[in-house]
Amino acid sequence: MCAMSFALLSPPSDFLAVYLFGKYRTDHVLRIASFVSFSGAMLRFASISQGSFWPVLAGTFLMASVASIFLNSQIIIANKWFSDKERAIAMAILNVSTPIGQIVSFALTGYLFAGIDQSLLSSEEFSKQVKSSTEALIVAQNIPFIIFFTLFQIVIRDKPETPPSAVAAAPPTEHSYCENFALLWRNKNFMIMALSYAIVYGVYVAIGTFMSNVLNPFGFTPTEISIAGGAGLAAGVISALLVGCYLDCTAHYKRTHIVLSGLTLLSFILVLPMLAYGSGQLFQ
């Protein structure tokens, strides 16, 4: 349910991010968003002593409500701080931060839950082990949020004193919030392109959200699920950097998107038949 909150709140928070970045300074929006996210993390931390799930869920909802603001800020930061020749690689590096964080999360989860004795399933001792590992995970997750909140309050700036490119120097076109969406909606080519990217990105998000639910019925342990997720994300980090460098050199945007879409389809064709074998035959 906690993982689902990010998927459920992502669409409305995307529209919120567009509105806030169009109306207010980038650094102000990010400072407020970091405070909301930090508050959610502290609420999750405070729930440890209570032993209740609902404060954890409430804190996760707070964090999920502003997650899209940070994701949408990447293109704005790239446009304001980098020139035309640097923007693609800058976006690749900025995008890498998300999968790196997920890799750390998978590794940390696998490490903390590796000591759980699966033979004690449904027993009181098993519940105690799961609770102890979950509490340790929440504490470990809160440490980056403290650092992250502090840096956003002190370091971040809206834009450099000298615009690095014509894109950064150009004043934004004045349209109302609804007019902007109406203009985009009438641009059929843009809508088709946005839909194609949304499908690929939606597949990526769905895999991260539901991986545990998909693999559990086939006998995969939490450690094995973490290894599988971490391997996939590590490949994503490497490919993001390679694709960023390739686009900087060639500007083959359409060709790159077609190749990546084809590889996504191929990965599903390869993975789905393997699930039926379970972890016993795949990892031994």
Image (spheres, rainbow, N blue to C red):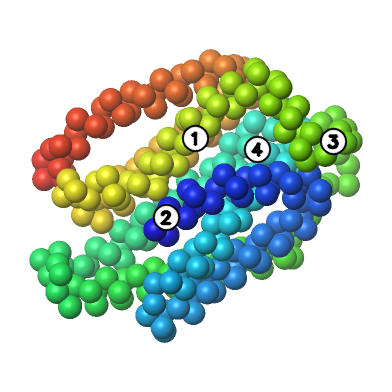
Q: CA distance from mark 1 to mark 3?
A: 28 Å
For the image, the number of numbered tags is 4
**Badge 1 density bin: few <14, some 14–19, many ≥20, Cα 10 Å:** few
Amino acid type assigned to the residue bearing label 2 in the image: Ala
Amino acid type assigned to the residue bearing label 1 in the image: Tyr
Q: Looking at the picture, does residue 193 appear above or below residue 241?
A: above
Q: Of discs 3 and 2, which sits in the foreground?
A: 3
Residue 203: x %, y % from top left:
42, 35
Residue 143: x %, y % from top left:
52, 69
Is mark 4 in CB contact (under 8 Å) with mark 1?
no
Give me the residue at 31% from left, 71% from top: 133
Q: Secondary structure at mark 3?
A: loop
Q: Earlier in the sequence, mark 4 or mark 2?
A: 2
Q: Using residue 217 as the reference point, say whether residue 63 is left or right of it.
A: right
Q: CA distance from mark 4 to mark 1?
A: 19 Å
User: In the image shown, does 132 or 89 lie closer to the viewer?
Assistant: 132
Q: Which residue is mark 3?
A: 175
Q: Which residue is mark 2?
A: 3
Residue 58: x %, y % from top left:
50, 68
User: In the image shown, does 282 or 35 lie closer to the viewer?
Assistant: 35
**Badge 3 density bin: few <14, some 14–19, many ≥20, Cα 10 Å:** few
Give me the residue at 15% from left, 37% from top: 276
In the drawing, what numbered circle is on residue 90?
Answer: 4
Q: Quadrant of the N terminus?
A: bottom left
Q: Quadrant of residue 40?
A: bottom right
Q: Looking at the picture, does residue 153 appear above or below residue 16?
A: below
Q: CA distance from mark 4 to mark 2?
A: 28 Å
Q: Which residue is mark 1?
A: 201
Q: Of discs 1 and 3, which sits in the foreground?
A: 3
**Badge 4 density bin: few <14, some 14–19, many ≥20, Cα 10 Å:** many
